[in-house]
């Protein structure tokens, strides 16, 4: 499916549904928040407008701010986050802008989670935020995106869509606009959206058009002349190591094209042969007994946690060793680099060495990622940084360090959690939506095709494979590891430049209906 902007249902003339209590607005600094705040006060709503002195990227400062507002103004029943509408600051880095626009929303929503849900139980509560991606979230037919298009704002939409699953009784909305629109018009549009509690979670405005995003079925047509420009002399770099989905798609490439495969992962490359004391043992109990015996021989503690860690490491090493051998047997030359993809020095060193050895990188598949699922009220800032940064910071490093003029393709592995949101995955969904908008931005600037693929969950492999039964109960259809790599090859051979946001999934079940998932629990 392709992600496309389509007409949204028109707004009725119903007035805004105000939450009562106190409504907090983050200030964009251009007058939009100030104008909206005045409209709200005229309607009797108590409003607190944050100031530039408030550091919304610091967890402690956000906690202190919310506590101060509570003490001075009473319970907070709503948040309108307009900070993303402020212009980019001089010499502001990507990381700083992501902190200012996206992490600030995470910290505010985390701090208000219980309060907003209590307000919704007793009346009305709202969380509305705005982005400045042009009015169609970068997914419209108009490809002339503004020069200040900020892919990082995709993270705001991903986070908001996840909160719609966690807070089904709260009015949750993200409104995308063209920043060049008059201030009064933008304030009026945002106020009007408060009168449509049952409307789409994602709404955009291009002129007078009200838009939303949909996944449009778009089957690929096989062509006898379509081919992926890869062969034995080509080099493809894959982040995400030699395990899971990355290894599955690497094997498909190895069978079809026998290229040089450059695998980048966090795990160290295991020895060629497993040690004799565990080699050939397959049962979990027997393996753990052998590991306990090894630890005791070495005079090391053998607590359950240490044994479990050693057991998981052994299984990972077996998977890496087996996958690399399988890739070689398929005819690929495999080169493994251990590196933290969030470390620019380390990842740049890998790229420099690959260019030195092979001359070019023809294709990139960015599959690195981690999940640490918790409801937003329970998620720590450190966990957010790890989940969000593993996908996003590494993608930004690649965008800066790759010799893009040589690339034939660059694929970002995203997730349906980003497209639809998912309960307990606010940070992961945010990261995936940044990758989707980064693909839009790079595809218009690079000669090769850049595409983001929002995968549904894969069966037996991948980060959520252990939740397969749970996901099936929620109505999510799993992707077979025998079929998924074929979809990727098809997309690279038959898909077209300009088609940047792709969804490959079966039935997404409850993900598509956040307001119907109120009773669901998180694992």
Image (cartoon, rainbow, N blue to C red):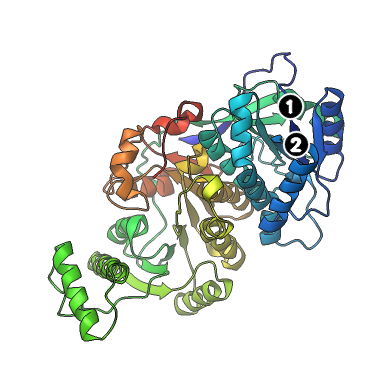
Is residue 264 placed above or below 4 in the rendered structure? below
In the picture, the quarter occupied by the N terminus is top left
The residue positioned farthest toward the top in the image shown = 13
Question: What whole-number distance in Å separates the C-alpha atoms at marks 1 and 2?
Answer: 11 Å
Instruction: Label 1, secondary structure: give it.
Output: loop
* Number of marks present in the image shown: 2
Quarter residue 301 falls in: bottom left
Percent position of residue 417, x then y: 47, 42
On screen, residue 135 versus residue 486, left or right, reads right
Instruction: Label 2, secondary structure: give it.
Output: loop
Tell which of 283 and 455 is nearer to you.
283
What residue do we see at 30% from left, 52% from top? 461
In the picture, the quarter occupied by the C terminus is top left
Is residue 140 placed above or below 282 in the rendered structure? above
Q: Is residue 449 visible?
A: yes
What residue do we see at 58% from left, 65% from top? 397
Residue 406 image label = none
Percent position of residue 321, x then y: 26, 70
Residue bearing the label numbered 2: 74
Tell which of 370 and 208 is nearer to you.
370
Percent position of residue 13, x then y: 73, 13
The residue positioned farthest toward the front in the image shown = 71
Looking at the image, is mark 1 or mark 2 earlier in the sequence?
1
Residue bearing the label numbered 1: 20
Badge 2, how many Cα within 10 Å: few under 14, some, many 20+? few
On screen, residue 318 versus residue 341, left or right, reads left
């Amino acid at each position: 499916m392709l992600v496309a902007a389509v007409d949204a249902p028109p707004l009725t003339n119903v007035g805004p549904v105000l939450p009562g209590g106190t409504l907090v607005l983050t200030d964009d600094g251009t007058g939009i928040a100030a104008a909206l705040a005045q409209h709200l006060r005229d309607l009797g709503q108590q409003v607190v407008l944050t100031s530039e002195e408030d550091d919304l990227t610091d967890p402690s400062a956000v906690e202190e701010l919310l506590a101060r507002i509570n003490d001075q103004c009473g319970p907070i029943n709503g948040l309108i986050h307009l900070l993303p509408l402020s212009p980019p600051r001089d010499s502001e880095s990507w990381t700083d802008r992501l902190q200012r626009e996206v992490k600030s929303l995470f910290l505010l929503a985390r701090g208000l989670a219980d309060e907003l849900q209590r307000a919704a139980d007793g009346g009305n509560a709202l969380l509305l935020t705005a982005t400045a991606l042009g009015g169609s979230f970068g997914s419209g037919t108009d490809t002339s995106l503004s020069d200040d298009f900020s892919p990082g704002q995709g993270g705001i939409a991903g986070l908001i869509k996840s909160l719609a699953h966690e807070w089904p009784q709260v009015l949750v909305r993200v409104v995308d606009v063209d920043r060049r629109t008059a201030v009064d018009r933008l304030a009026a549009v945002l106020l009007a959206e408060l009168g449509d509690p049952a409307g789409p979670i994602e709404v955009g405005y291009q002129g007078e058009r009200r838009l939303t995003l949909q996944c449009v079925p778009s089957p690929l047509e096989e062509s006898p002349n379509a081919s992926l420009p890869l062969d034995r002399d080509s080099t493809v770099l894959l982040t995400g190591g030699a395990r899971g989905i990355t290894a599955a798609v690497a094997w498909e490439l190895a069978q079809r094209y026998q290229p040089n495969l450059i695998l980048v992962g966090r795990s160290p490359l295991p020895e060629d042969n497993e040690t004799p004391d565990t080699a050939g043992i397959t049962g979990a109990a027997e393996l753990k007994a052998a590991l306990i015996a090894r630890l005791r021989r070495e005079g090391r503690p053998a607590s359950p946690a240490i044994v479990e860690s050693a057991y998981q490491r052994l299984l990972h090493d077996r998977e890496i060793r087996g996958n690399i051998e399988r890739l070689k047997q398929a005819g690929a030359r495999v080169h493994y680099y251990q590196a933290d993809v969030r470390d620019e020095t380390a990842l740049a060193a890998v790229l420099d060495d690959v260019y030195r050895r092979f001359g070019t990188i023809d294709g990139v598949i960015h599959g690195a990622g981690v999940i640490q699922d918790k409801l937003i009220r329970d998620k720590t800032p450190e966990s957010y940084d790890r989940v969000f940064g593993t996908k996003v910071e590494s993608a930004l490093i690649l965008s800066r360090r790759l010799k893009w003029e040589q690339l034939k393709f660059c694929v970002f592995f995203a997730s349906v959690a980003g497209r639809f949101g998912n309960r307990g995955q606010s940070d992961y969904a945010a990261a995936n939506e940044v990758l989707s908008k980064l693909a839009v931005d790079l595809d218009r600037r690079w000669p090769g095709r850049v595409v983001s693929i929002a995968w549904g969950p894969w069966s037996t492999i991948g980060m959520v494979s252990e939740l397969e039964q749970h996901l099936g109960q929620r109505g999510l259809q799993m992707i077979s590891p025998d079929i998924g790599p074929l979809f990727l090859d098809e997309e690279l051979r038959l898909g077209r430049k300009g088609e940047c946001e792709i969804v490959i999934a079966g039935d997404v079940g409850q993900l598509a209906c956040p307001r119907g998932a109120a009773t669901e629990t998180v694992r």
